[in-house]
Amino acid sequence: MAIQTTQKVLSVKDAIESRHSIRRFVQEPLPKEDLNQIFELVRLAPSAWNLQPWRFHVVTDSDLKEKLQEAAYGQQQVTSAPAVILAISDMEDVLANLTETVHPGLPDDRKQQEVANLSSIFGGMSVEERAQWGLTQTNIALGFLLLAIEGLGYSSVPMLGFDQEKVKELLDLPEHIKFASMVPFGRADAEGYEHHRLALDKTVTFH
């Protein structure tokens, strides 16, 4: 897939090494082609049973960003960024549309078996249990999102410090959804802190 973007494209290695959380952004609109390219990459994220429970709400409206900033306890990066992404998980929508996630190359009888199997598995869970399961998968897509943003020449800051019920109300989101993150992003107008990470021997064990 050819990448069409108005920004310089970084390698995966460079995107990982250069990514910092940025809280001040250049005040300029984001080209639609860059937004589309980011999500074309994110949609390739893997998920168990290919269920893809992530949904993304992109906010560029200034008035709505001000309301999101208020819900985020006044954090300035929300209105500084030209766009704010709400990454959510919606397993109830997934279950209502299971046939969309089954691979089209399967024979019809296999498709029906897959739908029946998944309906049985998740139907035996509570709404909350399904939601928590979906959130673990959505966090995979969140990682893809942060790297896609960085790789296409932009910067971001993932946040969970906000009133989730208020944001649900502002975006008219159903009660059952789970938030993976609020992600303001755009071109950086500040530098992030130097990386400070635990040593490998603290986080990695070889067996």
Image (cartoon, grey):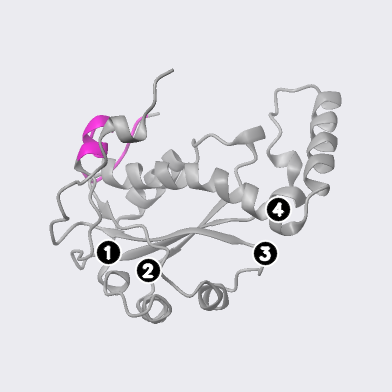
Q: Amino acid at mark 3?
A: His
Residue 171 percent location from the top left of the image: 54, 73
Q: Write down the quadrant of residue 92 in the picture.
A: bottom right
Mark before the other along the chain sequence, 3 or 1: 1
Residue identified by numbered label 1: 29
Image vertical order of residue 10 relative to residue 53, above or below:
above
- Tell me the residue that label 4 is attached to: 129
Q: Is residue 181 above or below residue 41?
A: below
Say which residue label 2 marks. Answer: 60
Q: Earlier in the sequence, mark 2 or mark 1?
A: 1
Residue 99, position in %: x, y? 75, 40
3D distance between C-alphas at marks 3 and 1: 32 Å
Q: Residue at x 77, y 45 (%)?
A: 122
Q: Which residues are magenta?
A: 2-17
Q: Nearer the viewer, residue 107 or 202?
A: 202
For the residues labelled 2 and 1, say whether their Cβ atoms are less than 8 Å apart.
yes
Do the CB atoms of the residues marked 4 and 1 lie less than 8 Å apart?
no
Disc 3 vs disc 2: which is toward the camera? 3
Under mark 2, the amino acid is: Thr
Query: Which three-letter amino acid code belongs to the residue tagged 1?
Result: Pro
Of badges 2 and 4, nearer the viewer stands 4
